[in-house]
Amino acid sequence: MPKAGIVTVVGKPNVGKSTLLNRIVGQKLSIVSPKPQSTRDRVVGIRSTADSQMVILDTPGLLNPKYPLQESMRSTALRALEDADVIVYVADATEGTPPSLAEAAGLKQPPRGVIVTALNKSDRLASTAKSELEARDFSLVSALTGEGVPELMARVEEQLPESPFLYPEDEISTQPMRFFVAEMVRETVLEQLHDEVPYSVAVQVEEYREERSPLYIRAVIYVERDSQKAIIIGSKGAQIRRIGESARGKIEAFVGTQVYLDLWVKVLANWRKNADSLSRFGYQLATGKSK
Ligand code: GDP
Ligand code: MG
């Protein structure tokens, strides 16, 4: 019997989740088409071997104490935790012993899945500190160098339930990439401007033309207010250019080809309060009828 299950990655901002995810799914990143059922669950990658399959989910913002999550986003993130067979709880090794996941995420009860705590950035530890943490059963990894990552994956794989593959290989489409591109642009905006535009940002890819070289992508960044639009554009367009450069780099690394990224900013007042626009951007409403 093969093993298969849902692996949810959770951790505070900046601990290295994205870097680790890139390493785990790497070049083999498989993309599930962004129909509502899958964006709801925020599948960020699928890692299949001959006899195991991990469907990897993300929990954006769940452990970010600075920005209380909007309700629908928190409930999406909590559901990703609930759904998990294995939870990879990523923390920064240089910050010492992390609080328990339940404590960090404010959970009323511990999640059902097995929690594997991965202490990342082990490359920044002295060897004595390393052996001390290893003795305490933490997985020490460096997403940057790759050290410890195969061992972490083996540990996760061990915990997967026996199950047929959740996504038959031939049903994993490699198209469309729009959802992932939109996520990369959104992530870039939040990286550069999270103090100014916390979660008021949504991104939609309106055009994706592979027949062009470079690949042409037109994406619209939606914000709620004119003032946010002005911040994103910046003085003489300097900010949007920086966002564009950084996001383009990520997208190029992801698609493996040169990209022309055409970014626009539009105001869509109160999109966060509007059920239609929430579902348009792939968020699941806690009480939505689509569930
Ligand atoms: P996220 O916010 O949890 O997704 O974190 P990121 O993946 O964006 O990483 C945050 C920062 O930590 C980036 O500057 C990374 O280059 C850096 N980083 C990630 N993993 C490692 C690691 O294993 N070692 C070191 N030294 N830095 C890392
Ligand atoms: Mg990240």
Image: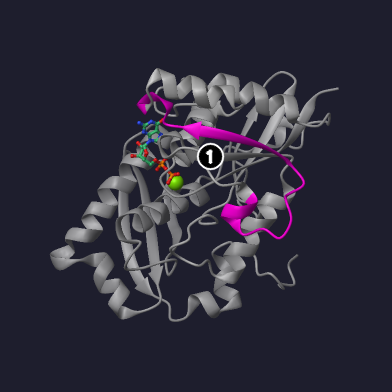
Against 136, residue 252 (above or below) is below
Q: Amino acid at mark 1?
A: Val
Q: Which residue is mark 1?
A: 90
Q: Residue furthest left?
A: 236
Q: Quadrant of the C terminus?
A: bottom right
The answer to whether the beta carbon of the residue marked 1 is less than 8 Å from any atom of ligand 1 is yes
Residue 226 pos. (x, y %): 31, 79
Residue 60, position as x, y percentages in the image: 52, 53
Q: Is residue 283 visible?
A: no
Q: How is the image coloured?
A: one colour
**Position in image of residue 52 (x %, y %):** 73, 25
Foreground residue among 251 and 213: 251
For the residue pair 157 and 239, the one nearer the viewer reads as 157
Q: Quadrant of residue 262?
A: bottom left
Give the extent of the magenta segment.
Answer: 102-124
Please, what secondary structure does the residue beneath circle 1 have? strand
Circle 1 Cα neighbour tier, 10 Å, few/some/many (<14 / 14–19 / ≥20) = many
Query: Which residue sits at x=33%, y=67%?
Result: 265
Question: Horizontal and vertical percent for residue 19?
Answer: 44, 35
Residue drawn 36% across and 27% down? 124
In the displayed structure image, the side of residue 282 where residue 113 appears, left or right: right
- Which image quadrant for residue 25? top right
Residue ID at (40%, 69%): 222
The quarter in which the N terminus is drawn is top right
Classify 152 as above or below 232: above
